[in-house]
Image (spheres, rainbow, N blue to C red):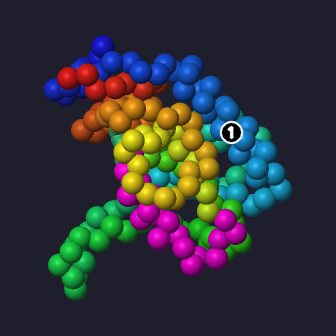
Amino acid sequence: MIRIGDKNFEEFLGESEILSCVRTLAKRIDDDYTNKELLILGILNGAFLFVADLTRHMTLDPEISFVKFASYEGTSSSGKVNDLIGLHEDLRGKHVLVVEDIVDSGRTLLHIQELLKDKGTASIEVATLFFKPDAYQQKIPLRYIGAEIPNHFVVGYGMDYMGKGRNLTGLYQLRS
Ligand code: IMP
Ligand code: MG
């Protein structure tokens, strides 16, 4: 049991179990993208560890970049707009692999898909280390899933609770 802020978390997956999922995905991606121009697009902040471990277990040499969602108040509209920051690459002709730490409702993915369309990519696929099938509300296919997990809040291996816990090597589930 560990404590972060006001909450208790219990280990759900250890470091070696996570790394074995990562290695399996790396092998599949290696096989699928041989001789293709691959751009790994990690979604910050959560995916930083997964991208680091995934790409070091791959034998391909992909382009690696990160994007982040920024919320800002539009000058002419009253609503909040979510934009992607950090997307400087020319995506034309590239096979883009969007890399997420975890897919929950799928809202983030839907948004990313909309922002990446009409950019002339050769393909767009999704790799997520963790997936909560019971929370997923989209139809976007997830090509690479490391592990399906129950619909409970988790921290560790990139994921946070109030900004903390991202550097934990295992995955921890909320207890109380
Ligand atoms: P979605 O848009 O609901 O699919 O959520 C995706 C994002 O929310 C992920 O990239 C995470 O950053 C965050 N998230 C979802 N579930 C959890 C969780 O259990 N713990 C920590 N962060 C989470
Ligand atoms: Mg995230």
Q: Secondary structure at mark 1?
A: helix
Residue at x 61%, y 57% (from the top left corner):
125
Ligand 1 found in image quarter: top left
**Left or right relative to 98: residue 160:** left
- Nearest the viewer among 125 and 26 is 125
Q: Which corner quadrant holds the N terminus?
A: top left
Q: Which residue is mark 1?
A: 26
Against 119, residue 21 (above or below) is above
Reply yes or no: does residue 142 show up in magenta.
no
Picture coordinates of residue 3, whole percent (x, y): 24, 20
For the magenta stretch, what is the residue range?
104-123
Residue 110 forms part of the magenta stretch:
yes
Residue 121 x/y as whole percent: 65, 71
Above or below: residue 100 compared with residue 35: above
Furthest residue to the top? 1
Q: Quadrant of residue 75?
A: bottom left
Counting every numbered tag in the picture gives: 1
